[in-house]
Amino acid sequence: MSTVPLDLETDTVVLPPPRLPDGASFELLLKRRRSTRGFLPDALTLPSLSALLWAAFGINRIERGGRTAPSAHDWQEIEVFAVLKEGSYRYDPRAHRLLLVKAEDLRALTGTQDFAASAPLNLIYVADRARMTGVRPNEFEFLAGADAGCIAQNVYLAGAALDLAVVVRALIDRRALAAALGLAPTQRITLAQSVGLAAHGT
């Protein structure tokens, strides 16, 4: 699989228009969906990265700013971060681009399991409490977790369409990763998800 390297000379990576392969039925994607914890080191292609991010929480109704995954009260409180070998980026769904957060490899901070440090892509789902107006204190984690779970399932199905290995994870040193990403006090890491080509035998 040929890869398109990210241009680290700029803080912005404009992604190509998202496109998932034609022909796979919804039933087939559900049959293919599985969690895989062994990844090859090969980088993802830029078109694959584009499709995954759009499927995760991209814009699917331009006129209304509707998203590919639901969110409680339409808060759209989840920010998607892409942690790659080249650096860590925040996904801007409205412009379908990546914005550089830190130009260093933070993959080892994205999970306590060994494979997180070498998976080509780790997606981090961050909930911003400041956007969740009127939420009851005891409902924040539940609602943010439910919204992040919908996003994670979209990535599983997109991964099945793209023949990529995927696993969602909750074992994260949230404090260390939040500090490295420069998150605000109102932002909390909910889940992480590793994506790449499956290692042989996994």
Image (cartoon, grey):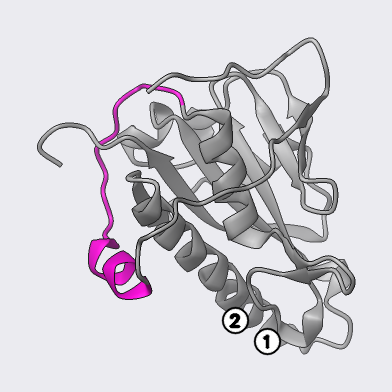
Q: Specify whether residue 163 is in view.
A: yes
Q: Secondary structure at mark 2?
A: helix
Q: Is residue 174 visible?
A: no
At label 1, the amino acid type is Asn
Callout 2 crowding tier (Cα within 10 Å): few <14, some 14–19, many ≥20:
few
Q: Is residue 69 left or right of residue 72?
A: left
Could you say where residue 30 lies in the image, as x and y percent from the top left? 31, 70
Q: Is residue 158 above or below residue 67?
A: above
Is 59 rendered above or below residue 115?
Answer: below
Against 56, residue 121 (above or below) is above
Q: Is residue 33 magenta?
A: yes
Q: Which quarter of the rendering shows the C terminus? A: top left
* Residue highlighted by disc 2: 142
Q: How far apart in space, not on screen, are marks 2 and 1 (Cα)?
A: 8 Å
Q: Which residues are magenta?
A: 26-43
Q: Is residue 139 left or right of residue 105?
A: right
**Residue 41 inside the magenta-drawn segment:** yes
Q: Are marks 2 and 1 in contact (CB under 8 Å)?
A: yes
Inspect the image, locate mark 2, and give the three-letter code of the amino acid beneath it.
Answer: Phe
Q: Which residue is mark 1?
A: 138
Q: Nearer the viewer, residue 143 or 164?
A: 164
Residue 84's x, y, as percent?
56, 28
Neighbourhood count class around disc 1 (C-alpha, 10 Å): few under 14, some 14–19, many 20 upward: few
Image-quadrant location for residue 79: bottom right
Q: Quadrant of the N terminus?
A: top left
Q: Main secondary structure of the magenta part?
A: loop
Judged by depth in the image, the label closer to the viewer, 2 or 1, is 2
Q: Quadrant of residue 7?
A: top right
Q: Position of residue 181 (x, y in %)?
A: 72, 37
**Residue sitting at x 82%, y 60%:** 186
SS of the residue under disc 1: helix
